Image (tube, helix red, strand yellow):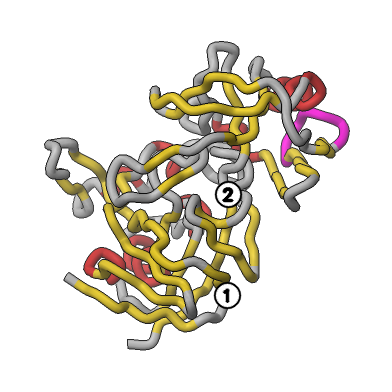
Amino acid sequence: MTAVVRELNVYPIKSAGGTPLTRAELLPEGFQHDRAFMLIRPDGRHLSQREIPRMALLRPSYDGVKLTVGFAGTGPDAPLGHAVPADGPVLDVTVHGNPCAGVDQGDEAAEWFTAALGRECRLVGFTGRRPTKVGGGTVRFADEFPLLIVSVESLAELNSRLDEPLPMNRFRPNIVVEGLGAWGEDSVRSLRIGEVELELVKPCARCVITTTDQETAVKGREPLRTLATYRTLVFPDGDRGVIFGQNAVPRALGAIAVGDAVEATRRD
């Protein structure tokens, strides 16, 4: 079966808009600069589109030195141009209750994001090490895993059931593959893309962020309403989830480019 990479995306700020790439460097924690930053409440808990859909309107890009953030809504008069400090105060923060650490990015950035979102918050940059709960990987500020892989055909099959088709950005994938077939990613256990090897370790249970339009921040009921009718899975621990896409952990590192061939090296 011939499959190819169709999209690559990074999300420099957790739960903010994504940045499409034509080429991405894969590190143990995921794509370079992916979820390198996070917005937190005053008590250190992370902010998410679950509670603040306006976060979808943040448009970040990061080159390893400067973080630039635009806002596709009513808010700050100018984009944020933030020179990321080499060090600074390290704060205790949490991601879904799990402790980790972040370097505070200063008052100017905090004021900009507070104005954009209408919610008191601060920006932190990832520091330290976070192991994944399963799969033997590491992650920055992502929820659980370094990578999310989705198939073009899976979205097409879902859209065939919806009154209005949805774009791929509702699902916030890192790697979009074409050629595996609808839900083909569910039966693949490992992929090779050039020198890169990925192990698909867990189906991705989807949350209400998928119901937020990533261009307007308007919330609806789809795709969760439809997915729940035929894509609900009971995990070994007894939890139930509505499934779309597969979480993956890198096993061999390197660069991935749009158009690269994808080989399924192990299937169920």
Marks 2 and 1, Cα distance to the nearest angstrom? 17 Å
Quarter of the figure that contains the C terminus? bottom left
Residue 216 in view (yes/no): no
Residue 144 in view (yes/no): yes
> Which quadrant would residue 183 be assigned to in this image?
bottom left
Kind of residue sitting beneath label 2: Asp
Q: Mark 2 packing: few (<14 Cα in 10 Å), some, or many (20+)?
A: many
* Predominant SS of the magenta segment: loop
Instruction: Establish if 38 lies above or below 174.
Output: above
Kind of residue sitting beneath label 1: Val
Quarter of the figure that contains the N terminus? bottom left
| Closer-to-camera residue (232/62) | 62
* Residue at image point 64% right, 64% down: 21
Q: Does the segment drawn in magenta span residue 77?
A: yes
- Total count of labels: 2
What residue is pinned by disc 1? 258
* Residue at image point 33% right, 67% down: 157
Say what secondary structure mark 1 lies in: loop
Q: Mark 1 packing: few (<14 Cα in 10 Å), some, or many (20+)?
A: some
| Closer-to-camera residue (70/105) | 105
| Label drawn at residue 34 | 2
Q: Which stretch is magenta?
A: 72-78
Is residue 192 left or right of 125 when viewed as pictured?
left
Q: Position of residue 126 (x, y in %)?
A: 59, 36
Say what secondary structure mark 2 lies in: loop
Q: Mark 2 near mark 1, Cβ–Cβ under 8 Å?
A: no
Is residue 182 left or right of 111 when viewed as pictured?
left
* Residue at image point 28% right, 56% down: 201
Q: Position of residue 50 (x, y in %)?
A: 46, 30
| Closer-to-camera residue (167/4) | 4
Q: Position of residue 210 (x, y in %)?
A: 43, 44
